Each structure stands twice: as structure tokens, then as C-alpha cells.
Amino acid sequence: MTYLAKPKLHHPDLPKNALGFTRRDYEGPVSTLCAGCGHDSISAAIIQAFWQLAIPPHRVAKLSGIGCSSKTPTYFLGQSHGFNSVHGRMPSVLTGANAANRDLIYLGVSGDGDSASIGLGQFAHSMRRGVNMVYIVENNGVYGLTKGQFSATADKGSKAKTGFVNEDEPIDLVLLALQLGATFVARSFSGDKEQLVPLIEAAVRHKGAAFIDVVSPCVTFNNHSGSTKSYDYVRAHNDAVNRLDVILKREPIAADYPPGSVQEVMLHDGGLIRLRKLHPEYDPTDRLGAINYLHQRHAAGEVVTGLLYAHPDAADLHDMQNTVTTPLNALSDAELVPGAAALAAFNAALR
Amino acid sequence: MKPTDIARPDYFHKVVDCQWACPAHTPVPEYIRLIAAGRYDDAYLVNWKSNVFPGILGRTCDRPCEPACRRGRVEEGSVEHRKSHLKPEPVAICRLKRVTADYKDDIRPRLPKPAATKNGKRIALVGGGPASLTVARDLAPLGYHCVVFEADAKPGGMMRSQIPKFRLPDTVIDEECGYVLDLGVEFRGGTRIDSMKALLGEGYDAVFVGSGAPRGRELDVPGRKEAAAHIHLGIDWLASVSFGHVKSIGRRVVVLGGGNTAMDCCRSARRLGGEEVNVVVRSGFEEMKASPWEKEDAQHEGIPIHNYLVPKEVLHDSGRLTGIVFEKVSARYDEKGRRSLIPTGEPDVSFECDDILVAVGQENAFPWIERDLGIEFDRWGMPVVDAATMASTRPGVFFGGDAAFGPKNIIWAVAHGHDAAISIDRLCRGEDVAQRPPPTFMLISQKMGIHEWNYDNAITTEQRHKVPLKDTVIALKDIRTEVELGFDPALALAEAQRCLNCDVQTVFAERLCIECDACVDICPMDCITFTHDGDEDDLRQRLRAPAPHRTQDLYVSAALKTARIMVKDEDVCLHCGLCAERCPTGAWDMKKSFLEMSHAGDTPRIHLPVHRARAAVAEAAAE
Ligand SMILES: Cc1cc2nc3c(=O)[nH]c(=O)nc-3n(C[C@H](O)[C@H](O)[C@H](O)COP(=O)(O)OP(=O)(O)OC[C@H]3O[C@@H](n4cnc5c(N)ncnc54)[C@H](O)[C@@H]3O)c2cc1C
Ligand SMILES: Cc1ncc(C[n+]2csc(CCOP(=O)(O)OP(=O)(O)O)c2C)c(N)n1
Ligand code: SF4
Ligand code: SF4
Ligand code: SF4
Ligand SMILES: [Mg+2]
């Protein structure tokens, strides 16, 4: 951390978005994480994405659990709603908030410990319910906040800073999310904002459960040579299947792409994800293919990144539960308390 | 791009915009930090070493450092400024220099002593202005016998004869010229040199010509001769005012000209009985030669400035001046951008007046230098002088100050003086004059702890502080009353805090960088980018923020592990050190680059970073 607040001065040519805000307006107070922590880069990517999308900060709710990763919502979107919940319980708090006010944009930020260890059950249910949210796991393979014990995503055979070797099988949250019905699934790397920022933008615009696993090195406890979540390891083993270029309205494809190398995925709001394919066979609309591919590459020791699966017109929790379209907090007393006669009629209908 | 060679002293020197812009390369941020620490003596001496006249310059310097100051750029477009509708402003570098002079103790014990033994060399200096006095200051302590010949009774040159006392009191001139003469310099006041040939005949080892640009340019319009009794050449009139020969002027005064001399004339006239003083200028307000603050000061004293008026005729009543007529013009620019003033055809404008002060330019004149001595002059009557060595075409004769390249200012005269002194010293030692000594250059880490630095890296958003002025009514009553009161210590401290410490450099060690982006994310000014290599034009487009200012360098690393390079645009860096605080491996460090020009007799010290060696050790430790 630094003791100084980030100076208010900014670059004279700092651009403004459609709302008239600069990127700096989407920041929070200075981070207290360790210098060089991957989580801080993810915060910067979130700031960049929300600024680029020109989202009014007060329309965003950021929720998290416990961990270094879960501390980060303090350090971005300083003008947004925030809720720092209990360890592993972010998904249910977020689900509740979403049920009550479907009009906000929900951003869940969690860690691999928070989501894959103590919070695995919560994680699973929020995915299968299709809660309309962006769920980001800042995955460093350790419990950073409690000084670097292995988490459930640590690869078998990887070595702790102390020399201790992990003998347990890892949980791959991306595979779980795919199996549990998440409708937007991606993996990225904190050290690659060119890939990460458009993924976050696409996830925000996706309707339904959007999950991004971001490998995020813990510089203090898990950035050594025995780690599979270090800057060096991820850079050496990164198998990026695609890169997102634009997420705009349909435009002619720029001529300089070789044929077949561009794939378009529609978004439910009419927007478009344009993918530059790096792996010619990979098809991000094929859930089973994605699962197979991930298994294969994991066995080869590689970290697959990119947009792995997207289902453009997915249903979300509200569709499935057939809830009212008005957020609960906007319903009037008359609508919420229809009176004894209405209750009697309802009860009669069930008899 | 080729990786930046930071071992070249020029690279980091250029980042310190103020010091780079200063003709004498005064270590500005160094003295500003000393002011903030209340160490006025030390701050004064840092100045004295490089610019010889801190108290004088702190009141009068043309301050080329201020337009260059980074602070003026980083405030551009900031939230604070948008809110307050204030324009970005540089640090008040010049007025902080005065602070060092105002609040120092007696520093005389810390000045060099007259040489205990003389080296037997005799140097003649023609003129007692800042150029000659600088040469004498540099050479006398080395044992040279310096003789200053000055037509006026006292030393100081135009600092004493031209600059009005309400801007620069005599006490300050006496003090700082005194420090020079106290080094054992022989001053021959009231002695005009009439013949260079005769002077050369006296067997001096070297002669320095610091005789200034003493002649005012004339006004050539009908009526000028007839009304001559009340038409004065600005610099002659100012000298008469300074020396007390002129004590009053008519009620209505017209000042012709738009330079600093015109500003001094009009403000002096206001104090000597001029109630209706008008400044009339050929050009537009923006193009006027006077510094913005001089124009502001004149207007503050109720003096209107009229632009685009060309003198046409002086009106007189059988020899008694009654007024002056001007033709209205407008500026037109041809395709090459050259300006011409075209009459608009509107009716002429005339001013009734009792006196006219002509301040339309200044010229050199060397009637006392014979043309057969091997000292070459060009067709404009200017001596042929080497800009690096200040040597004329005759070995052993040097020029400096206004005498060398025409009228400039005090700080240029000082810079010339230092260069000439080096040349004279080398000449007298039988060394090659063309070879110049490198500056002293040191690069020292400021790291004290993980987040602690040897400098105050917090960035204030305070706006520039104004120097308190004497009440105008009182100031206008007496021409010897100094107008500016100077900063008090509290204001000085607040203003000093605005300095960004541009000499505390961001130094990058590529071998330690793990490309975690922490510095990129924290940098408030978007200075740092990691990207693939390219040529400079291409890179300048691809950075996190565009880098359009080509005079501001890009700091470029060698290839990193991912084959990308680190590019830092030096332009608007706050030198806040956050990049270095954020860096997990110490790949960024904040190092103070201390650069001091070498003066005659100095042994330059070079302390280069053992950066590579230290980086390797740190890397080994990190493994
Ligand atoms: C009205 C006015 C206001 C100015 N205000 C400022 C200002 O605010 N800030 C600034 O930086 N600059 C200012 N200047 C410019 C500045 O004064 C000069 O650039 C500077 O003094 C030049 O220094 P110098 O040593 O070359 O010569 P000068 O200061 O001109 O000194 C030359 C000296 O040589 C003497 N001399 C000349 N010929 C002989 C001879 N043959 N024998 C013996 N002695 C001789 C002269 O009497 C004179 O004293 C101003 C100039 C004028 C005219
Ligand atoms: C109920 C509960 N159990 C245990 C803890 C202790 N604890 C705090 S953070 C943490 C692990 C966090 O790991 P992760 O989510 O990966 O976050 P990181 O710090 O690595 O970003 C644990 C076990 C707790 N705070 N609450
Ligand atoms: S302990 Fe690890 S995860 Fe936590 S802030 Fe430090 S580097 Fe980041
Ligand atoms: S901020 Fe300070 S160091 Fe930087 S240019 Fe201005 S005065 Fe010089
Ligand atoms: S010192 Fe570092 S963090 Fe601060 S503005 Fe300069 S480059 Fe950016
Ligand atoms: Mg973790």
C-alpha cells in the first residue's frame, strides 16, 4: 500500500465518456493490497470497462465476501453501492439484492478461497439460478489474506512458498460454471488487460449469470517458481483461444482478418461481441466442446483463456421465477399489501 | 526505439524543465526544497553558486524557467482548475529565489575567501555589469587579479542604472556586487575605456568585454527635432532618474514602445508627477516584448496600454511639445507567417502631452574598439563571438552579456560570464579553450523505507500564491519605495510545496520488472505504458495518453520478458513516486539527479548509478 492518496491531478488530455466522466471518476480510494498484487490490476480493468461503457456509477452494486480479493470493491467505483458480506456468502446476498431490485447492475467480486473453498455451495447455486450478474473470481490459488495457504483451485503438485506440496485435486471454477448452466463463461489473466477489459464489458452487457475466472498472482505468497499461478507461469502457459475486439452495433468486418478467423456472438441487447479467433477450432457457443477442450488443455498443463462460452439469449432468475418487472423497492404499498379481500381470494384459489 | 541512455547527464537534466530552461542552469528544485526546510542560507548559496545575484534576480529575472515549469502543464484541465476557472500556473520560482535572499542570515563566512596567493595573471574587464562581475567572481578566488573598469561610479551596470529602484533597491545591488568585489577584485569606478588598443597595450593576460548595449534607438518622425527638449530616450532618462539627476516629469506623458524598458519608463513617470501616462505600442498587446507580469504591473498602476498605433508626427508650438499623432494599423500575416502592419484608413489618433519617452529599442555600440585589432565585427556592427567559449576572433579577448549578442537580460549575462571565465582560465593554463568541462552529475536514491522517501512526495493542488504588494497609493508617492513586499515565510512554504521535485527522477531497472502493471494502474497521470516496440512517432500515438509534446522525451526500456518495452512519457509526470511505492520488486526507484554546471576551477564530480550492479544483487536476493 501507499500512504499517499492518489493525487487529484490527471493527464490534461484524459478523455471523457458519454456521461462526461473521466476514467479517474470511476476510481475508489488507494488500494491497501500488497504492491504488485494481481487483484489491483483487475480493479483497474473494472474501472476501465465501466468507464468505457459509460455506466452511471450509482446504478451499480458491488458485492464481495472475505479475502484480499473481496477487499478490492473498496478501491474501484467509489460512487457505487457496496456490500462486503461474510466469507463465502456473497452469492446469496447478491441473489437477494438482485431479487429485490432487478434494475441495478450486479458485480460480485470474490476469491478462489471465498468461492471454491468455503463458498463453493453458494457459488454453485447462483450459477444454476442464472442470477443476472457479473461474477469475478480473482484466482491466485491461495488464501492471500490469511498468509498463503493453498486454496481449492491450487493445482495438484504445485508448491507453496514454504516448500509444501499440494496433493489435492484442484477445482476448476470455469468447468463448474459451465456444468451448472452459467450462460457467459470466460477466463483471463490480471496481467493482460487487453483481453480482460472487453471480457468485463461483454459480461456486464450479458443478461444472466456471467462468470469470469481471472488468474491473479499473489505476489507475496504465490509468485515463485513452484507456483502455477505466478506471472511467469501463466505467461508461459497461456492458451488464449480468442480475443474480443469490439462490442458495438453490427458493422462490416474489417478487411484485414483472414477468412474464418472472426466469429460474432450476439448480445441480448442487440450489441455484438466480435471475436478474433486464435484457436481456429474453438467455438464459444458449444458448451460441450468447451468442456472437452478445457479438460484436454488442463491435462497438458495449459491455462485456457478467452471467452469460453456465451449463450446470447439466456433466461435469468427473474424470467425463470416469473417475477414482476418492477423492482420491489419501486412497488407501491397498494401493490405490496393488496388487502384482506385479495388474500382471501388467493387462498380460495388454492383450496 | 533505442533504450534511453540515462547515464548521459543531459537526459535527466532535461526532465528538470526549469533548470534546463535557465541559462545558468540553476538547480531550482534543490533550492525550493531547502526553502521548504527553512534552510534559507543553503538555498541562497545554491543560487549564488550558479547565478551570482539571487537577491537581484529574485526581483528582476526574466525567468525563462517559469514558462517551462511542469506545474503549468500538469494543472491543465484538472478538476480543481475547472471548478475555480483559474488558469494553470507555474511555481513562482523567481519570487522564491528572493525568499532565499530575504531570510538568510549573514552568509559571508561561507563565501569563498580572496585568494591567499595570486597566480600572477591579470584580467581586464570592461564594464561593471553582471557579465563582468560574474567573470570576476569565478576567477578571483582562483588567484587571478581582476580589474573591472566601469564608466559609472558604482558597480552593477544596467542593474543599477536602468532598473528602477521601486523594483530593485540599491541596498540589494550594493550587497551582491559587494560579495564579488570582496573576493579581492579591483574596481575602477568612473573610468571609461576609450581605446581597446591602449588597453591591450597594458599587457593583460585576457580582456573581457562586458560593456552592454548602451544606446537607445531613436524616433524618426517630423517634429522630433523641434520638440527635442521634452522628448527623451528611455534608457538615458531612466539612468538620469536612477542617479537622481531627473526628479520630475510633466503631467501628461506618452511612452512609446512595448518592451520592458517602456514598462519601467511609464511606471517611473507615474512616480515623478506623471498623472496621465499612456503607453502606445505599434504591435498588438500579445506580441509586446514586455513580460506579461510587467504589463500587469503597469496596468495595476493605472497606466493604459494602446496598441496598433504607429507614431506619425510630433506636434509642437514653436518648439514647445504639445502632443503626438498616431496612424491606426492592423496586423496582417503573409503565407510565411511574416507580419506587416497595414494602415486601417481610420482617422488618426492623437494624444496631448508634456513629455515623450522613447523606448523603442536598444543597440550596441563599440566606438572605443578599433577595427584593426583582429577583433572581427559583422555587418550589423556586432562582434563575431563563439557562443560556447565567448571568444572573439582575437585570442585573449572575450565578450559576454549584452555586448556579445545584443540586449538580453541579467541571467544570460551571468551565463556568459561563467562560460567566459572557464575560457579565460583554460587559456591562462595553456589548455584548449574549445574543450568544456562536464557538469557535476549525481543520481542518488531517495528511498528511506518501503514507503518513505527523502523528499516530500505529496502533491498539493494549491494554486499559485500572489506576492503581496505595497499599497499603490503609497508606492506611487516615492520612486524608491519597493512595490513588491516578497513572500513571508508561510507563503514561501506554501508556494514551495507546489514544486513537483522534477529532479527526483523515476529510474527504471528492466531486469527487475515482472510486468504486473502496478505502476501503470497507480500512475495518476497515465505516464507509463507497456507495449510492443516501435519508432518514436508510432509509440507517441500508442501510449495510454497521447504524447504530443516532442520536446518532452520518452523514457524507453530495453525489451522485457514478454518482449514488450516500458515507455514513460516524461511530460506530465508528478514525480510523486507512487509508481516506485507500488512496484513490488523495486524496478522503479526515485533518484535525485543533482546537476550543477562546472565553473572555472571546479572539478566536476560524477556519481553515476551503480544501478545495474545493485539491480543484479536485488534480483539475486529475490530468487
Ligand atoms: C530599462 C531596462 C530594464 C531592464 N530590466 C531588466 C530586468 O528586469 N531583468 C533583467 O534580467 N534584465 C533587465 N534589463 C536588461 C539588463 O539590465 C541587461 O541585459 C544586463 O544588465 C546586461 O548586463 P551586462 O553585464 O552585459 O551589461 P550592463 O549591465 O549593460 O553593464 C555594462 C556596463 O559597462 C559600462 N561600460 C560600457 N562601456 C564602457 C567602457 N567603454 N568603459 C567602461 N565602462 C563601460 C556601462 O557603464 C555599464 O555599467 C533591463 C534593461 C533596461 C534597459
Ligand atoms: C467464516 C470464515 N472462515 C475463515 C475466515 C478466514 N479467512 C479470511 S480470508 C480467507 C481466505 C481468502 O481467500 P481468497 O478468497 O482466495 O482471497 P485472497 O485473499 O486470496 O484474495 C479465510 C480463510 C473467515 N474470515 N471467515
Ligand atoms: S497477500 Fe497476496 S492476494 Fe493479498 S494483497 Fe498481498 S499479494 Fe495480493
Ligand atoms: S515543478 Fe519545480 S522542479 Fe518542476 S519545473 Fe516547476 S519549479 Fe522546476
Ligand atoms: S512519479 Fe511515477 S506514478 Fe507519479 S506521475 Fe510520475 S510516473 Fe506516474
Ligand atoms: Mg485467493
Image: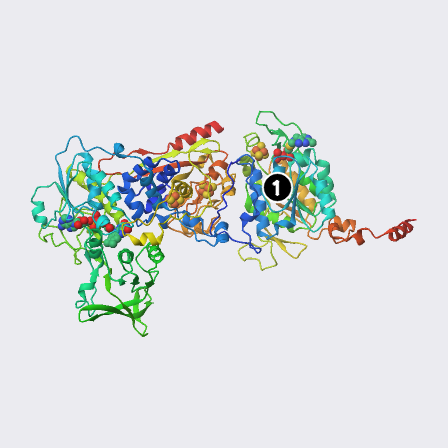
Task: Classify the position of ligand 3 by quadrant: top left, top right, bottom left or bottom right.
Answer: top right
The chain containing the residue under callout 1 comes to: A
The answer to whether the beta carbon of the residue marked 1 is less than 8 Å from any atom of ligand 2 is no
Going by the picture, which residue comes out furthest to the top? Answer: A163
Going by the picture, which residue comes out furthest to the right? Answer: A351
Nearer-the-camera pick, B487 or A102? B487
Nearer-the-camera pick, B22 or A247? B22
Q: Is residue B406 left or right of residue B346?
A: left
Residue A284 placement (x, y as % from top left): 65, 48
Residue A160 sits above or below residue B565 on the image: above
Q: Is residue B233 left or right of residue B620?
A: left
Indicate how the structure is coloured in the image: rainbow
Q: Mark 1 points at which residue?
A: A73
Secondary-structure class at tag 1? helix
The amino acid type, in three-letter code, at marker 1 is Pro
CA neighbours of label 1 inside 10 A, class few (<14), some (14 to 19), many (20+): many
Residue A279 placement (x, y as % from top left): 59, 46
Q: Residue at x 65, y 27 (%)?
A: A167
Residue A155 sits above or below residue B1 on the image: above
Would you identify the image quadrant in which residue B53 lies?
top left
Would you identify the image quadrant in which residue A18 lies?
bottom right
Would you identify the image quadrant in which residue B287 lies?
bottom left
Nearer-the-camera pick, A204 or B264? B264
